[in-house]
Amino acid sequence: MSPRVITLESEIDWPGFRREARTLLASLVPPDEVVWQTPGHPAPELWQAEAAPAPVAAAAPHRPLNASRPGRLVVPPAFITLCEKVVLHQDPQRFALLYRLLWRLVHERGLRQDPLDPDRLRARQMLQSVRRDMHKMKAFVRFRPVGQPEGEPPLSVAWFEPEHHIVEAVAPFFVRRFTQMHWAILTPECSVRWTPSPKDAPPLAGDEALPGELEFGPGASREQAPGPDEGEALWLTYYAHIFNPARLKLSMMAREMPRKYWANLPEAQLIAPLAAQAAERTGRMVQTVPAEPRRRIPARAPLPPVDTAQDPALTLTSLATAADRCRDCPLGEHATQVVFGEGALRPPLMLVGEQPGDQEDLAGHPFVGPAGRLLDRALEELGWPREALFLTNAVKHFKFELRGTRRIHKSPGQREVLACQQWLEREIALVRPQAFVALGATAARALVGRAVPVMSERGQWLTGPDDLPVLVTLHPSALLRGDPAERDTAWRAWLDDLALAGRYLRGEDPALNRPRAAA
């Protein structure tokens, strides 16, 4: 039986292929009895001589599909997407491959679960090749202005040599990107030109209406493409100066930008000489003295040492005044005021939190908000008078973000904690506590000098400033944010942590008098 020769209207006649394939499939014409041809790739003369001129449906009597198969053709949506791209491939056998896959999808149910099938693999490779070619056209097309008659708008023309029949498929991308520009793209197979609508033209109706005219024409030759323009000399100078020889990888460059595209890229002529000089330029870069880095937190002269002969309380007041004017980090600029520590001098314990909250920022005193009230309740239950302790924070200004009219607490960053470290250290030197309680991770890091996982090291004694012991536990705000159903359990565990400090100071447990050194 002579094969059926199907002639499509163009190389990318996807609607025609879809229509013919459905007719062939409904007539149960197997793939090996069909020959596909396009104007650019006619069928061999042998098939042409034997081909029947009548339409497929008339030449073959209609045979209904099997009863187990539905009359309506249903294929996976991914197969339609694959066909729309594979028909753009340059392989003359692409239509035969797609019809063979369609036939097998209908008659071989297991094909959909076989990703290693040779036909599926070949179609997938063709799909990836088309997509890569489309990406390269979007990346490597370079427009150059060409001379126009007086009164005509300027026209920009580009030359590109695609591997596949992708020009019509990629043209809408350039329409969206250069909607207001007159441009044309020349390729060996076809050319495309875009003419935008005048600015005073009435708006077009319909979602798919283009604000201009997109025209396709015959192909062109490389000689018809415009040559270099005046701006390319400036671009080449810029490219040569930003070329980084230390990051040169020619194999990677050739893979992402194949050499066949280099002829259309003006900077490609610089790649070879720049690559040849790469080793020498890299050596000069290594030997160059590095520039002085710019610091977001400028280096400041160290504060004078603490004068222990003066009244510590007066010195604390002057220290707080100096901290209020600190701008080593942005927090001081936006906070209401500095919130320095308060309490007894030479105390048994210094309790260090993270930073003041909204109410502390307004009042100018530490631990007066919800977390402070929870701390007061704990001190009362433990029998610790607040006035016998010293309460402070690792960071002295309130960090927040605005949500409407509310100021929401925001944890300080490491650079902000480091900027405030000098104030905490001088505060400790004046107060001279016997031990510390670090309330939360920020306080623990400021005292111990390293990141401390609070949940795994809570209730442990570490070594802090001047080899003084530091007890690590949660910040009271962590209890307020916790699960209400577990709040009583968390409260008791937190009290147990704090009680260790009292036992340490009373010497009731000698094992507690040996704090662990910071790792």
Image (tube, rainbow, N blue to C red):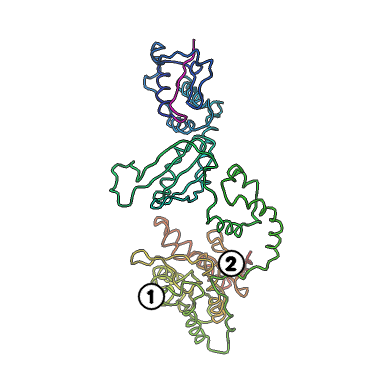
Q: What residue lies at 45% left-to-right and 13% top-to-bottom? A: 52
Q: Position of residue 32 (x, y in %)?
A: 51, 17
Residue 362 badge: 1
Magenta-drawn stretch contains 216: no
Q: Quick check: 221 above or below 200? A: above
Q: Position of residue 140 (x, y in %)?
A: 53, 46
Q: Nearer the viewer, residue 490 or 340?
A: 340
Residue 461 badge: 2
Mark 2: give few (<14), some (14-19) or many (20+) Cα within 10 Å: many
Examine the image and state in which quarter residue 430 appears.
Answer: bottom right
From which residue to which does the magenta span run?
A: 1-12
Residue type at mark 2: give it: Trp
Spatial separation of the CA atoms under disc 2 and disc 1? 34 Å
Q: Quick check: 169 above or below 330? A: above
Mark 1: give few (<14), some (14-19) or many (20+) Cα within 10 Å: some
Report the side of 148 relative to 282 (left or right). Answer: left
Residue 126 badge: none
Residue type at mark 1: give it: Leu
Q: What residue lies at 53% left-to-right and 32% top-to-bottom? A: 126
Among numbered discs 2 and 1, the one appearing first in the sequence: 1
